Image (spheres, rainbow, N blue to C red):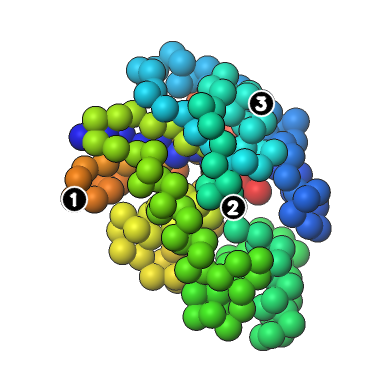
Amino acid sequence: MGELYLVRHGQANTGATNEADYDRLSDLGHRQARLLGDWLHANEDGFDLTLSGAMRRHRETAAGMGFPPDYEDQRLNEMDYFALARDIEITHGVAPPNSQDDFADHIPQTLAAWHGATINGAEPFATFETRIFDALAQAAKPGKRVLCITSGGVIAMVMRQALGLGPSQMAHVLLPIWNSSLHRFRIRDDGTYLVSFNTIPHLDAPYLVAARTHI
């Protein structure tokens, strides 16, 4: 039986209005990455393979954790949510979210429209889904321990596969994912099985409550 550990990157540049500006860690994001790396080094056995997406926030998170990837894989990059938000505003008149509360309504509508192919953003939903599954099928094998630093949308898509989620349920899984959170799966020949979701053991201490962020 193999093990797959997925990590969401630390907090990125939350004030950005486009993907390029968003794609770097905040000071808090760097701290989250360091704390998670310290916890993993102290509490987990080593990994047979470490990989990451190819985005700057993935690389910075991996470096801060002290787990340099054996390779970067663009197939593990995040969806371009800014492009999806533009498409759904133009096509369906749905205004972009202005707060975290707005995201609770915006993400389910956007993923439903993307899944239904009434919007495409930077790529079709099916392309996003297939590239993630292909990358992880290549990396995660029975008998191997794999650590992967990626993004919330990628993690939600793996949850979709493991639990058979529709786009609405996938959106509800995506919304609460913490920055620098840890998600564990067992890999068997017959499928991928969820072990734990959205844990932040490195931020459990009460004095770190302000370091827990979703966006």
The reply to whether discs 1 and 3 touch (Cβ–Cβ < 8 Å) is no
Q: Which residue is mark 1?
A: 190
Which is in the foreground here, disc 3 or disc 2? 2
Q: Could you tell me if residue 18 is visible in this image?
A: yes
Q: Secondary structure at mark 2?
A: loop
Q: Secondary structure at mark 1?
A: loop
Q: Is residue 34 left or right of residue 158?
A: right
Gap in angstroms between the C-alphas marked 1 and 2: 26 Å
Question: Does residue 53 lie above or below 68 as drawn?
Answer: below
Identity of the residue drawn at 21% across and 34% down: 1
- The amino acid sitting under disc 2 is Glu
Of the two numbered discs 1 and 3 on the same chain, state the one appearing first in sequence: 3
Viewer-side label of 1, 3: 1
Question: Which residue is farthest bottom?
Answer: 92
Which residue occupies 38% across, 60% down?
160
Q: Which residue is mark 2?
A: 78
Q: Judge the density around disc 2: few (<14), some (14-19), many (≥20) Cα neighbours within 10 Å.
A: many
Q: Which percent across, then down, holds residue 85?
A: 69, 70
What amino acid type should be assigned to the residue bearing mark 3? Arg
Q: Is residue 159 above or below residue 202?
A: below
Can you say whether 155 is above or below 112 in the image? above
